[in-house]
Every structure is written in structure tokens, then in C-alpha cells.
Image: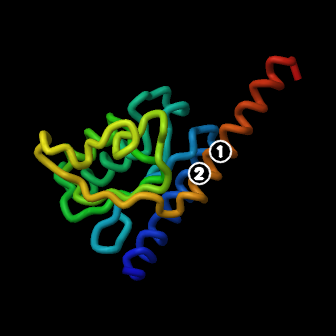
Amino acid sequence: MQIHEDVDAFFMAKAIKEAQKAANKGEVPIGAVMVRDQEVICAAHNLRESGQDPLAHAEMIVLRRASKQLKSWRLEATTLYVTLEPCLMCMGAIIQARVPRLVFAAFDPKAGACGTLYDLSNDSRLNHRVRVTSRVMEHEATSLLKGFFKALRKEKRLARKGL
């Protein structure tokens, strides 16, 4: 089991690097990496603010890129690594894309659809199930998110004070 954990940590570290890229752009630091046969197919990070696009979640971008790269909307035999538990929209897209395995770092208490608020990954009413591994590098992903939002709150306080 240790080998599997090491592989998951290796690819999650790449997703965290993507999340840092998002933070550097002023985006919520969420990153995603799509892997097949132990190779990265593509990677992405949130771009909602940059593109003023509500659909530009890291997962949505990586699903589109992977489909284009693999020339198929069916992303079978892949694993999606993401730094935060996917929301309803992203879990719906993951299911529609037939991604068999999802690995995420931190749970999302406000929008999580993979065990927190909802669990679409294992809903028997849907035509596809997603095997989920959670809490891989949770501390690193959570620290990045908390640091980002702390800095954002500070920036807003200073702006209100006219500084």
C-alpha cells in the first residue's frame, strides 16, 4: 500500500504546484492534474477571476484538456488529482467523463460533493461510480488555502480603511 500512497503524494504535489500558480494570479489556490499510466496528461488551476468564467474551476479545465489530448470524452483509465474536494458541478463533470478514480487533498465544508455536503462519487442512482482517496497532502493544501484567504481578508480590511 505504501507504493500507492507514494504515487498519490507525488502527483498531488504537482496539483499543489498548480494551486500555487493560481494563488500567484490572485485566484483561489486550487490545482488539478490528470494522470494516465503514471504520466501527467495535463494540469490546470482555477481561472475564474482571470477569465470571469464561473466554469473555470481547475477540474473543469483539466477535464477539457485531457479530453482533447486523449481525443475522447471518456477519460477511462485515468486518475484525477485535485487539491480541494470537488463541488457539485465538477463532480458531475467527473462522472460524465467516466473518470474512474479521484484523489483529493482537503475536504470542502462549503461546497464538497464527494463526501462532505453530498457524495456523488458513490450515488447508486448514477451510471458511473468514482473511487475516491481523500486527505492526500491535506495539510499542505489546507495551509495554502488558509494563507490565501487570510491575505485576501487583510487586503480587504486595508482597502476599507483606505490604505
| Residue 112 rendering spot, x and y as whole percentages | 41, 40
| Residue 39 rendering spot, x and y as whole percentages | 35, 71
Seen from the viewer's position, the closer of residues 124 and 15 is 124
The number of discs equals: 2
In the image, what residue type sits under mark 2? Thr
Seen from the viewer's position, the closer of residues 76 and 128 is 128
Query: In the rendered image, is residue 33 in sight?
Result: no
Asked if 68 appears above or below 48 in the picture, the reply is below
Q: Residue at x 15, y 49 (%)?
A: 128
**Mark 2 neighbour density, 10 Å: few (under 14) some (14–19) many (20 or more):** some
Say if mark 1 contacts mark 2, CB within 8 Å: yes
**Residue beneath disc 2:** 142
Relative to residue 32, is residue 100 drawn left or right?
Answer: left
**Mark 1 neighbour density, 10 Å: few (under 14) some (14–19) many (20 or more):** few
Relative to residue 100, is residue 48 drawn left or right?
Answer: right
Q: Residue at x 59, y 58 (%)?
A: 139
Label annotation for residue 92? none
Seen from the viewer's position, the closer of residues 70 and 59 is 59
Label annotation for residue 146? 1
| Residue 77 rendering spot, x and y as whole percentages | 21, 65
Distance between mark 1 and mark 2 Cα atoms:
6 Å
Q: Residue at x 62, y 41 (%)?
A: 25
